[in-house]
Image (spheres, rainbow, N blue to C red):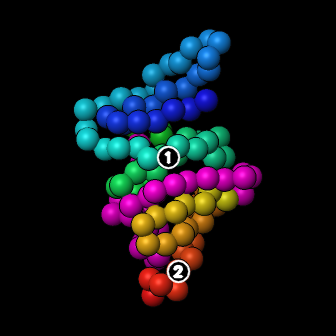
Amino acid sequence: IIISGYGQTLLRGNAREGFDLLHQASIDMKFWSVRKFQDQIYVGTTQGLRRFNGSGFDVVRQASVGFDETTVVQQIDSVSHNYLWIVSDRHVFRYDGKNVEKFEHPDNI
């Protein structure tokens, strides 16, 4: 189980063996959603999609579709290792581990 929360808190573990603290910082960034995808840990934040690099977080960016640290990510999910689905406050995105594709919502065009 991976748990995320305030203060960039990231925990991994289970009820039997306990949890290990992977990361915590005093920077005020809230993690709204967390998902393991293609053997990497991703978190959705109000400041973009972030990939855990073992000691901190790298921002996932795709300038061609306006996806960067200004994207408000509300939810991330995947049902396979092919795509990570990203729901933002205005659009839906699909990430394949390299490229982000934007799906326009008719109400936001």
Q: Are marks 2 and 1 in contact (CB under 8 Å)?
A: no
The residue range painted magenta reads 57-82
The amino acid at mark 1 is: Ser
**Residue 54: in sight, yes or no?**
no
Residue, disc 1: 33
**Residue 5: in sight, yes or no?**
yes
Residue 30 in the magenta stretch? The answer is no
- Relative to 39, say whether 76 is above or below: below
- In the image: residue 6, left or right of residue 104: left
Residue, disc 2: 105
User: What residue is at 63 percent from the left and 46 percent from the top?
Assistant: 37
Which residue ends up furthest to the front in the rendered image? 107
Residue 41 in the image: state x and y as whole percent: 55, 41
| Image quadrant where residue 27 sits | top left
- Relative to 20, say whether 53 is above or below: below
- Quick one: quadrant of the N terminus? top right
Crowdedness of circle 2 by 10 Å Cα count: few (<14), some, many (20+)?
Answer: few
Residue 71 in the magenta stretch? The answer is yes
- In the image: residue 47, left or right of residue 65: left
User: What residue is at 60 percent from the left and 60 percent from the top?
Assistant: 85
Residue 69 in the image: state x and y as whole percent: 35, 59
User: What residue is at 67 percent from the left and 59 percent from the top?
Assistant: 83
Mark 2 vs mark 1, CA separation in Å? 21 Å
- Relative to 88, say whether 36 is above or below: above
The amino acid at mark 2 is: His
- Quick one: quadrant of the C terminus? bottom left
Q: Earlier in the sequence, mark 2 or mark 1?
A: 1
